[in-house]
Image: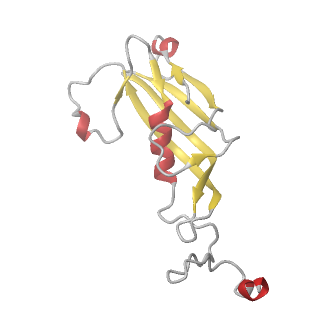
Amino acid sequence: MIKKVSVGELLHSVPGTQIEHLIADLDQTPVGAVNFKIAPGSEANSLIIRIPDGVVLAIPYAEIEIDVACDRCLQNYKHNLIIENAEQLYYTHKLDDVDVEDHEFGYELISNKHQNIDLNTFLADVINLAIPTTLLCDENCTGIDYKTQDDTNRNPFAKLLDQ
């Protein structure tokens, strides 16, 4: 499981203070991940910035490799994702003038007891949003023949060679 990040010291500093955090254990697929697994070796740099009512977790830029199945031929392959300017606000207390459901940027509360922020949900959401609607192992992937259930990406003369 991807670890939680302690922001206790940051909460006692002045607004504008920031810390860099390397998210290096991305080979663990975050909870909430849909139809993908993060490939080993992927990592992302993040910034945690103190704001008056909490902190902002930001990933300015990351390249993450995921293992997914092609939508046409169902073969597993590695797909590279580029994540830019992903942010999540974490507040220390419930804001009186903000409706949680209508908040534009998401609304998370930092536990006063533990003063940790959990990266699992944030990473799963960011990666799910970065995945294209159609995942193809190759732009020219022809997929599976719906009548014979054969992979049409194979050599069309392969059956002749098998005889």
Q: Position of residue 148 (x, y in %)?
A: 55, 82
At 62% from the left edge and 73% from the top edge, which residue is drawn?
139
Find residue 112 and report its horizontal and vertical position in percent: 37, 13
Can you say which quadrant of the picture contains the C terminus?
bottom right
Q: Total marks drawn?
A: 0
In the image, residue 36 above or below residue 108: below
Is residue 63 visible in the rendered image? The answer is yes
Look at the image and tell me whether residue 13 can be seen: no
Q: Is residue 114 above or below residue 18?
A: above
Render colour scheme: secondary structure
Lateral position of residue 12 relative to residue 93, left or right:
right
Quarter of the N terminus within the rendering:
top right
**What residue occupies the far front of the structure in this picture?**
163
Of 67 and 128, nearer the camera is 67
Q: Reply above or below: 128 against 1.
A: below
Q: Is residue 108 left or right of residue 17?
A: left
Q: Nearer the viewer, residue 128 or 96?
A: 128
- Residue 44 lies, in percent from the top left, at 62, 38
Percent coordinates x, y for residue 117 in the rendering: 46, 24
Q: Residue at x 40, y 27 (%)?
A: 90
Is residue 161 left or right of 48 when viewed as pictured? Answer: right
Residue at horizontal 76 percent and vertical 83 percent from the top: 162
Q: Nearer the viewer, residue 13 or 86?
A: 86
Describe residue 97's horizontal placement relative to residue 146 as left or right.
left
Between 16 and 12, which is closer to the camera in this rendering? Answer: 12
